[in-house]
Image (cartoon, rainbow, N blue to C red):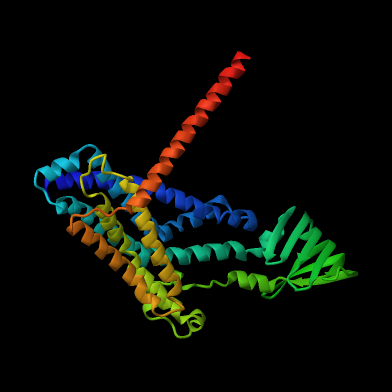
Amino acid sequence: MKVVERYIMRRTAAMFLAALVWTLAIVWTTQVLAKIDLVTDSGQSALTFFEVAALIIPSIIPIVVPFALVVAVAQTLSAMNTDSELAVINAAGASRWTIARPILLLALAASVFSFAVDNGVDPYARQKNRQLVAASRADLLSLIIQEGTFRKIDDGLFLQIGERLPDNKLGGIFVADSREEGANLTYYAKTGSIVEKGDEKVLMMNDGVINRKSVTGDLSVIRFTSYAFDLSAFMSAANEITLLPKDRTTQYLLNPDPNDRMFQRQPGSYTAELDQRFSEWSYSLVFALIALAVAVDARSHREARIHPLITAIAVALFVRWLGFFAAGKADKVWYYAYMVYAVPIVASAISVWFIVSSRSMELPSAWADWMTNLAGRAGEGWTALRLWFARRGTSGQGA
């Protein structure tokens, strides 16, 4: 590898790692916030929460890596163009492939990494994640007997224990049950206890009332001396782990169990998941080619209409949207499976044509002029607003 190629690879790799860390951190944070109910609803420790949060990372790496790469390539080449380094390289007689070769090698390494994570690490991480979530919700007994907490047991079913009494008794029991369509049930009991009968667990409530409110607003009150509320169904449901196609290993997807209930209901989703895994890795190469087609040429500041980074990201977002759209339809419409592979192939072919034909992939001139004028007007408006606030501040001090 030539000195200039090692220089380009070093700069691009450094920018890629920086962009990957920050992009991964942002996306990971948004995903982690959706799991915060694991601590608030299930009463789990922070250690369990962070373990579940760490297992999310493999699922977002294949999505984040291509975007970090397109940012790194476009920004590196744009900076080299600003410093006139691309002009010097072109003047020295080097071809476009002198610049493209180290970038494509980096993209190939990123693609291999994405493929390994998507087909090797991610399925096991997803399975472990589901096991942790199921285990955290399966310990329903310890969840219920916490004092002064209002807990969601199931959709439409909530329970609160006022206090714990001696001899494993419970006091101040409140149950809200709206699972039955057209009726809301509310249970109040002064005391109660958890009774275990073999594998069954029953919440025995003593000295209480049941309020039943219908859709029409009619309210009926039933007093009881003792009432048994079965909890076994919820505990068994919490212990069950349902694995979706995304949670299965690639080996399993290639040869699924015919008795798998999920496979029997949605066989197309298994094939669609395979198609996505075998195509998703290629987007690192595709996005690198897009960035090269946009920013590989040396250009003067007068020629540049829109920053190459903006153009590259806009094209990459459109291509990735097409890929997601095709993958979302592939389990229901068979010909979308071909589109899953066609999107990266066609995008790569178009980018290679731009590079080989010594053209630059740019937005249409009308769009570029419109965006430039819009940015100029926004800048003028911001300057006028700052001057207005400055004058208001000066007049206020003078008064």
Relative to 134, residue 74 above or below: above
**Of 172 and 25, which appears nearest the observer?**
25
- View extreme (left): residue: 93
Q: Quadrant of the C terminus?
A: top right
Quarter residue 168 falls in: bottom right
Give the residue drawn at x 64%, y 57%. 41
Where is residue 205 drawn, in percent x and y?
A: 82, 66
Left or right: residue 90 versus residue 175 is: left
Left or right: residue 3 versus residue 303 is: left
Where is residue 395 drawn, in percent x and y?
A: 59, 18
- View extreme (bottom): residue: 258
Q: Is residue 68 visible?
A: no
Give the residue drawn at x 25%, y 65%. 349
Give the residue drawn at x 42%, y 41%. 375
Quarter residue 372 falls in: top left
Quarter residue 143 falls in: bottom right
Q: Is residue 294 visible?
A: yes
Give the residue drawn at x 26%, y 57%. 289
Relative to 231, residue 4 above or below: above
Left or right: residue 189 versus residue 20 is: right
- View extreme (top): residue: 398
- Report the number of discs: 0
**Of 225 and 308, which appears nearest the observer?**
308
Left or right: residue 382 versus residue 230 is: left
Where is residue 393 drawn, in percent x and y?
A: 57, 21
**Of 189 and 243, which appears nearest the observer?**
243
